[in-house]
Image (spheres, coloured by chain):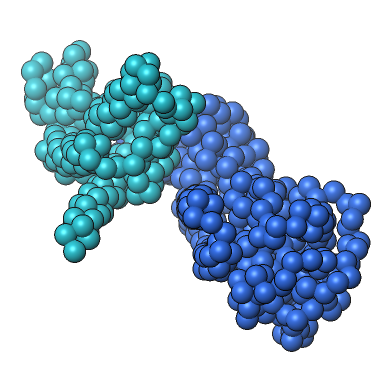
Amino acid sequence: MGEWSFLGDFLEKVHKHSTVVGKVWLTVLFIFRMLVLGTAAESSWGDEQSDFMCDTQQPGCENVCYDKAFPISHVRFWVLQIIFVSTPSLVYMGHAMHTVRMEEKRKMKEAEIEARENKNGGDTYYQQKCSVAEKETKLSGWDEAGGQIILRGSLLNTYVYSILIRTAMEVAFIVGQYVLYGIFLETLYICQRAPCPHPVNCYVSRPTEKNVFIVFMLAVAVLSLFLSLAELYHLGWKKAKERCSRSYKASPNTAPGRLESAPQADRAQMYTPPPDFNQCLSSPNGKFISPFSNKMASQQNTANFATERVHGQEDAAGEGPFIKSSYVESPEVASECAAPAFPENYFNEKRRLSKASRASSKARSDDLSV
Amino acid sequence: MDWGTLQVVLGGVNKHSTSIGKIWLTVLFIFRIMILVVAAERVWGDEQQDFVCNTLQPGCRNVCYDHFFPISHIRLWALQLIFVSTPALLVAMHVAYTRHEKKRRFRNGEKIDIEELKNQRLHIRGPLWWTYTSSIFFRIIFEAVFMYIFYYMYDGYQMPRLVKCDAWPCPNTVDCFVSRPTEKTTFTIFMLAVSGICMMLNLAELCYLVIKVCTKESGKAA
């Protein structure tokens, strides 16, 4: 099993950023395929050629008959199958890591701009920060609180394609195995090939044990195939549901450029308020920096912000996950930042108590939101 | 063969590589080293034991095997992987030297964050760019050389089923049969294809680095 550590290490990272079904698939891969192959199947096939006996004394006849009977050994075939079936996940992982890196670069840029602005003074700070934030909003696929990648946009497409390719590979290898060997191994193999002088009886070593493993590995391959199809169905169904609910519940108050966080009750882990306002107010290192000089107002805002994050979707009834708090300062500074974006009731007086005011804002780290 | 040590060394270089470099490293570890260790070594495991010659003459089988397989595919692939990975060590050495210089300046009184120094990712600029590019160039050369050696030594990439041998002490031309020729051909072609892919990745990375520098230069000029 140590030999599989190269692939195992990579797949551990994939495991962290997969959906629930994806994790089950990976577990099946690790335990029922890699482990079984490495420990049991290898030793069962260990003497496959040395104990392949042919009823002949002709030198070379056994070699050529073994080569004809087993063009590629079952074990090697399964090794290739596991590697090819895992490869699409690695491609997805590459894309995810790339997204993370882009996110980190964005944060670094924001930090730089903020540092620059702090030196220059606060006038144009809000404007610049918000314009950068609005541009970078669409790149954002990274949930800071949970440390998970949010599946959306191109990342979701990559994920879906990787599952499709994985399914295709699985089918190809199952069909390939059937074409090469059928399902069961026969004990007796009759061979006619030079230099064998006539048709020769050859006897396969441990056929029953090999058949048990062949059926087992075939069953696991079919199970993996079903899991992949289930994952596709799960992703496709959720996407379709989202689209329907989005078109049904389109709110007139929803600002342009905020499509991703439009009120959708079934987005389980989406807890961002409007992204541009979010970006405007929070700094990359997590400290809440208020453009307003009123300390109390900004403290109130911090509290609201934290609680709003967790259950934003519960407010989908109609108000949207907007932050409302009493600001003593003039709203012009804020509206300057995202004037077209904010609706009129954004800066109203009453502070709305979030239903989540007692809930923990700790994100659930085990599932990806789609 | 313990490839874990190589993984540790190359893992350090990975941090300072381009994206294409990281893909290359992944392909190297999963499609070459892992296949070599998990599959290919087993296929070639009994290559001499099951090399059968149609003769009772003692010593004839040994001599014929040695004549047709001067160096086994497995060992040749292991050498290829080691040579192809070695240029990355140049980059590792350069990075270590840069860090050492920074530490020295820190000791002499300059203000440098020693914690950050350990984890800092160096950008591929200046002398590091030259080191990195020459390492990729050498990688490409080594890949090509080994692919040619394979072709030259074994007359192509297909494993013959039957070889005719008349080396002394075989009394006449003797038929010798290679063990598992089809499986060996499959893996030889697979490893050849992956070498080709790695070479393409290296060429792409080289082009990317050159273009990056050229655009920077033209940007500065403009």
Q: Residue at horizontal 79%, vertical 66%?
A: A328
Point out residue A71 in the picture as x, y percentages from the top left corner.
Answer: 39, 45
Q: Is residue B158 left or right of residue A21?
A: left
Q: Residue furthest top?
A: B58
In the figure, the shade used to draw chain B is cyan
Image vertical order of residue A123 relative to residue B212, above or below: below
Which image quadrant is residue B174 in? top left
Query: Is residue A346 visible in the rendered structure shown here?
Result: yes
Foreground residue, A285 or B143?
A: A285
Which image quadrant is residue B126 in? top left
Q: Is residue B124 left or right of residue B156?
A: right
Q: Is residue B166 left or right of residue A21?
A: left
Query: Is residue B49 visible in the rendered structure shown here?
Result: no
Foreground residue, A103 or B155?
A: A103
Point out residue B153 in the picture as x, y percentages from the top left corner.
Answer: 14, 34
Point out residue A175 in the picture as x, y percentages from the top left corner.
Answer: 52, 59
Point out residue B138 in the picture as x, y percentages from the top left corner.
Answer: 18, 37
Image vertical order of residue B28 relative to residue B97, above or below: below
Q: Residue at horizontal 59%, vertical 50%?
A: A284
